[in-house]
Image (tube, helix red, strand yellow):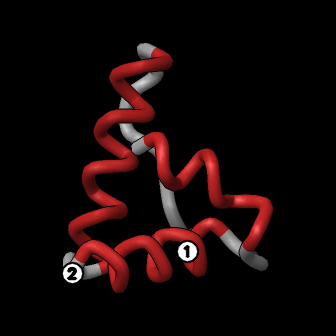
Amino acid sequence: MRLVFEHQEKHASQWATIGSIASHINYTAKTVRKGYARQSGTAANTGPLQFGA
């Protein structure tokens, strides 16, 4: 999701960025994260991003 990339520097973490965007578009952070991970993996041909340890 382009919004996550564009707004990452405004927030302390990627999760904070996702949460902020989600609240503005009336989605849950989990839904935005899934779309972001899916789109990022597809764009880079590397598979979905891994969150957490």
Whether pointer 1 and pointer 2 mark residues with C-beta atoms closer than 8 Å, the reply is: no
Q: Is residue 25 above or below residue 37?
A: below
- Quadrant holding the N terminus: top left
Residue type at the position of mark 1? Trp
Please state, as top left, top right, bottom left or bottom right, where the C terminus lies in the image: bottom right
Q: Is residue 31 left or right of residue 23?
A: left
Q: Is residue 32 above or below residue 49?
A: below
Residue farthest front in this picture:
24
Q: Earlier in the sequence, mark 1 or mark 2?
A: 1
Q: Residue 1, relative to residue 46: is it above or below?
A: below
Q: Residue at x 53, y 54 (%)?
A: 4
Q: Secondary structure at mark 1?
A: helix
For numbered disc 2, what is the local secondary structure?
Answer: loop
Number of marks drawn: 2
In percent of the image, x 37 and y 49: which residue is there?
36
Residue at left offset 20%, top offset 76%: 27
Query: Where does the image place residue 25, in percent across and percent down from the top left?
Result: 27, 73
Side of 12 relative to 47 (left or right): right
Q: Which residue is mark 1?
A: 15
How dense is the environment of label 2, judged by Cα within 10 Å: few (below 14), some, or many (20 and up)?
few
Which of the labelled discs sits on residue 26, or is there none? 2
Q: Is residue 53 left or right of residue 48?
A: right
Q: Amino acid at mark 2?
A: Asn
Residue 34 in the image: x percent, y percent? 27, 57
Judge by depth and name the residue closer to the eye, 40 or 17. 17
Quadrant assignment, res 23: bottom left
Q: Position of residue 21 (x, y in %)?
A: 43, 72
Task: Please name which of the two marks, 1 or 2, marks the residue nearer to the observer.
Answer: 2
What's the distance in space between the residues labelled 1 and 2, CA to CA?
Answer: 16 Å
